[in-house]
Amino acid sequence: MSTDLEDTGELTLPEDLEAFPAVYDRYFDQIYAYVAGRLDSQAADDLVAEVFTEAFRCRERFDPERGNLRSWLFGIATNLVARHRRAEARHYRALARAAPEPDTDSHEGRVVASVSAQRLQPALAKALAGLTAKERDVVLLAALAELSHEEIAAALDIPYGTVGSRLSRARGKLRTALEGTER
């Protein structure tokens, strides 16, 4: 395999260690942003290194017929995040508990609270914690990694239609959980 750019701008998976840095350089920022959005940045540092180590170690299992290299790397990242799922759920519950309540005694305080993105953070964290792991994976791959439905399907090795139904179900749950919160 070569590391040359294909017509799609996608790298192929190199077979040798010397060529692998091109894959790392190309996809590190995207994978890091996704993992850091799912976990904290310190955990992301370790986990992203593990993603690329695992990708190199399992490079013979990459099948371009099942999806592109980017999707495969996001699939590895999602699987590694799944190992940390309990910590992730604890993280969301902690965010929901720890966010300070804004001062709403004055008109000015109420205005500031209503326009503050911090105001929504605890409710959003609680709503994300309330999703199933599979729903959370789809939502966060779409929102944080900005993957298309096709890429999410490839990353999670699920049918395209399943992506749409999980995303729709998750969005409905999030909408319900966030009803009445000030934005």
Image: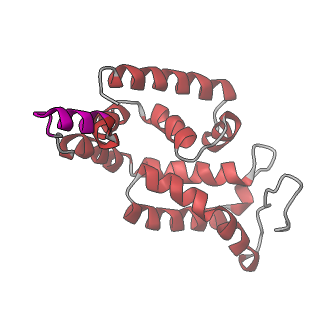
Residue at (71% x, 77% y) in the render: 17
Give the x, y percent position of residue 26.
69, 65
Give the x, y percent position of residue 143.
53, 40
Q: Main secondary structure of the magenta part?
A: helix
Residue 104 among those drawn in magenta:
yes
Task: Establish if 176 lies above or below 134.
Answer: above
Q: Viewed as shown, does residue 106 lie left or right of 64?
A: left
Residue 96, quarter of picture: top left
Give the x, y percent position of residue 10.
79, 56
Residue 30, quarter of picture: bottom right
Residue 65 among those drawn in magenta:
no
Residue situated in front as seen by the camera: 85 or 26 = 26
Q: Viewed as shown, does residue 183 lie left or right of 51?
A: left
Give the x, y percent position of residue 55.
64, 62
User: Which segment did they paint magenta?
Assistant: 103-114
Task: Establish if 157 lies above or below 7.
Answer: above
Q: Viewed as shown, does residue 133 lie left or right of 126?
A: right
Q: Quadrant of the C terminus?
A: top left
Residue situated in front as seen by the camera: 35 or 61 = 35
Q: Quadrant of the N terminus?
A: bottom right
Residue at (49% x, 21% y) in the render: 169
Quick one: which residue is furthest to the left in this view? 105
Residue 126, quarter of picture: top left
Task: Establish if 52 lies above or below 36.
Answer: below
Residue at (52% x, 52% y) in the render: 34
Residue at (73% x, 71% y) in the render: 22
